[in-house]
Amino acid sequence: MSVRKIAGLLMAFGLMVGLIGGGVSAAFTDQVTAVQHISVGTFSCTIVTPSDGLIAADGKSVLYTYPAIESSAPGTAPFSFTVANTGSMPAVLTVVESAVSAPFSNILVSPAAVILPVSGSHTYAAGVSWTELGNSNLGTSGNVQYTVNCNSVTNP
């Protein structure tokens, strides 16, 4: 064999080995996945039981009409209602009452704030009282409104 043929064969052999070496390899692969699921709870307060009156279909209000006052003597018109936490997280309840004019006064008994746990409820003892009525009170009427604000409990 000539040197030229041997050199050509060596070159071809080297090229084949280079191609085979570059194309033959083993690669193993694998993977894993981590998923975090998050969801936001529900938040809702409703009026569930008034002492008397009609609850709105959505449970957000109650209307109570006290019978007409038929005496000038001092008296009271008590009214209570219960607010329930129907959400999935605690709530802080605060109540605001509208003003009434003399000789009437509001008799709401309520702490400044109530922390209501999930499925908990709080009854508000409210109503109106009055001193002796006079002729200037004849034919008058009025309303007192209690607004209970339900807020989420905030963490410091």
Image (cartoon, grey):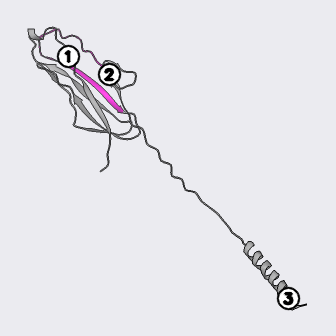
Q: Quadrant of the N terminus?
A: bottom right
Q: Quadrant of residue 131?
A: top left
Q: Is residue 56 above or below residue 26?
A: above
| Of residues 106 and 71, the one drawn nearer to the viewer in this rendering | 106
Estimate the x, y position of residue 122 in percent, counting from the top left: 30, 32
Estimate the x, y position of residue 104 in percent, counting from the top left: 14, 20
| 140 drawn magenta | no
- Element on which disc 1 rests: loop
- Magenta residues, start to end: 63-84
Please state which amino acid type lies under the numbered disc 1. Gly
Do the CB atoms of the residues marked 3 and 2 lie less than 8 Å apart?
Answer: no
Estimate the x, y position of residue 46 in percent, counting from the top left: 36, 29
Do the CB atoms of the residues marked 1 and 3 lie less than 8 Å apart?
Answer: no
In this image, 82 relative to 132: left or right? right
Residue placed at 78% from the left, 79% from the top?
15
Residue on which disc 1 sits = 142
The CA span between labels 3 and 2 is 108 Å
- Element on which disc 3 rests: helix
Residue placed at 31% from the left, 28% from the top?
82
Please state which amino acid type lies under the numbered disc 3. Arg
| Of residues 63 and 120, the one drawn nearer to the viewer in this rendering | 63
Residue on which disc 3 sits = 4
In this image, 74 relative to 127: left or right? left
Q: Quadrant of residue 49?
A: top left
Answer with mark 3 or mark 2, whichever residue precedes in sequence: 3
Residue placed at 54% from the left, 53% from the top?
35
In this image, 36 relative to 83: left or right? right
Residue on which disc 2 sits = 62
Q: Residues within 10 Å of mark 3 (few under 14, many from 20)?
A: few
Please state which amino acid type lies under the numbered disc 2. Val
Estimate the x, y position of residue 33 in percent, counting from the top left: 58, 57
Q: Residues within 10 Å of mark 1 (few under 14, many from 20)?
A: few
